[in-house]
């Protein structure tokens, strides 16, 4: 494989002159430029892009750790990231994780190896202390509230909307509430905010009925028989409008009386079904996260979720 030294030898010019031509540097005579370019064409030489990026100290790539795209929260967030990236000189590198800590750590190691300039965690399993130990290798942004000032924090404060929902439910005398979640774990900001808001309104002595590992319409349809088996449930608060649609479909197909069903993400499905929802500003979150990934210093950006009562 041809290299820059061979080009210099065959063209009769120095390595530095060849380098200037490859980098479109203006301080090269027209005669030298043409001779060097002819040798490059003859050798069918292609520069090593990675080596060039490393020599410049930037890859113009932003890594995005994303567990999956089965839930609309992640697809809308990703749309925001993609649109922001297209308006810049940077590329997105999608890094699927499935909440696998070893994979997430491998992506942090890739940041250390300069595979990309910045890293965005749309959601995570690895602990924040471990993440913070890698900020010296590039910007790291987490799409959640983070106390460590070295890590960029871009998140949606969902609790005001959740408080509004639970206050409304209590005023309407809804007492037995089922929550449909992707993860019922402390790492999940959705779970923490939802449960915190619930307890502030209903207290800790009457916990909600929680169902987890539900990310889409199919998951919701599968769990619906368990919901229907409990005639005490009078409200089903889901983690997505399409999830709500899966529950509604089961109840309708089986001729069952449907409890009040609430969605999230303000999708077209909730508009068509006419059900309440929460707009979690996922698209705007993606745009803000990308901007923070390119920022000169870590900062905190907070968006506010909105309860839409239909």
Image: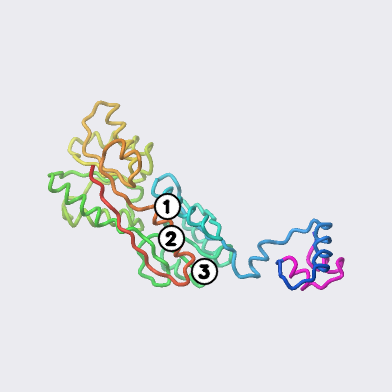
Name the residue beneath numbered marker 1. Answer: 77
Name the residue beneath numbered marker 2. Answer: 289
Tell me the colour scheme of the image: rainbow
Split into 4 quadrants, where in the image is the N terminus?
A: bottom right
Please report the bounds of the magenta region as a residue range: 3-22
Residue ID at (36%, 66%): 146
Q: Is residue 20 magenta?
A: yes
Label 3 crowd bin: few (<14), some (14–19), many (20+), radius 10 Å: some
Q: Nearer the viewer, mark 3 or mark 2?
A: 2
Q: Is residue 207 magenta?
A: no
> Could you tell whether 60 is left or right of 301 in the image?
right
Disc 1 to disc 2: CB gap under 8 Å: yes
Image location (x, y in percent) of residue 275 = 26, 40
- Label 1 SS: helix
Disc 3 to disc 2: CB gap under 8 Å: no
- Label 2 SS: helix
């Amino acid at each position: 494989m041809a290299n820059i030294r061979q080009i210099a030898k065959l063209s009769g010019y120095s390595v530095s002159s060849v380098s200037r031509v490859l980098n479109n540097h203006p301080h090269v005579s027209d005669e030298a430029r043409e001779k060097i370019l002819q040798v490059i064409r003859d050798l069918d030489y292609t520069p090593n892009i990675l080596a060039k990026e490393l020599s410049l100290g930037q890859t113009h790539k932003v890594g995005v750790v994303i567990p999956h795209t089965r839930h609309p929260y992640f697809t809308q967030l990703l749309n925001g990231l993609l649109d922001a990236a297209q308006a810049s000189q940077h590329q997105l590198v999608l890094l699927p994780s499935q909440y696998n800590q070893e994979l997430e750590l491998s992506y942090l190691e890739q940041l250390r190896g300069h595979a990309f300039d910045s890293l965005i965690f749309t959601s995570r399993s690895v602990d924040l202390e471990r993440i913070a130990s890698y900020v010296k290798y590039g910007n790291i942004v987490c799409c959640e509230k983070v106390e460590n000032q070295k890590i960029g924090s871009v998140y949606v404060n969902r609790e005001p909307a959740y408080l509004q929902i639970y206050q409304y439910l209590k005023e309407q005398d809804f007492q037995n509430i089922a929550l449909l979640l992707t993860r019922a774990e402390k790492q999940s900001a959705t779970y923490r905010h939802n449960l915190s808001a619930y307890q502030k309104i209903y207290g800790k002595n009457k916990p909600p009925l929680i169902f987890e590992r539900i990310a889409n319409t199919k998951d919701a349809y599968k769990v619906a028989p368990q919901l229907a088996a409990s005639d005490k449930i009078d409200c089903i608060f889901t983690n997505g409008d399409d999830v709500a649609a899966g529950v509604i479909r089961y109840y309708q197909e089986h001729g069952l009386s449907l409890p009040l069903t609430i969605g999230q993400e303000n999708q077209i499905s909730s508009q068509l079904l006419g059900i309440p929802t929460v707009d979690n500003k996922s698209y705007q979150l993606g745009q803000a996260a990308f901007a923070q990934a390119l920022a000169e210093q870590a900062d905190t950006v907070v968006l506010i979720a909105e309860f839409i009562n239909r």
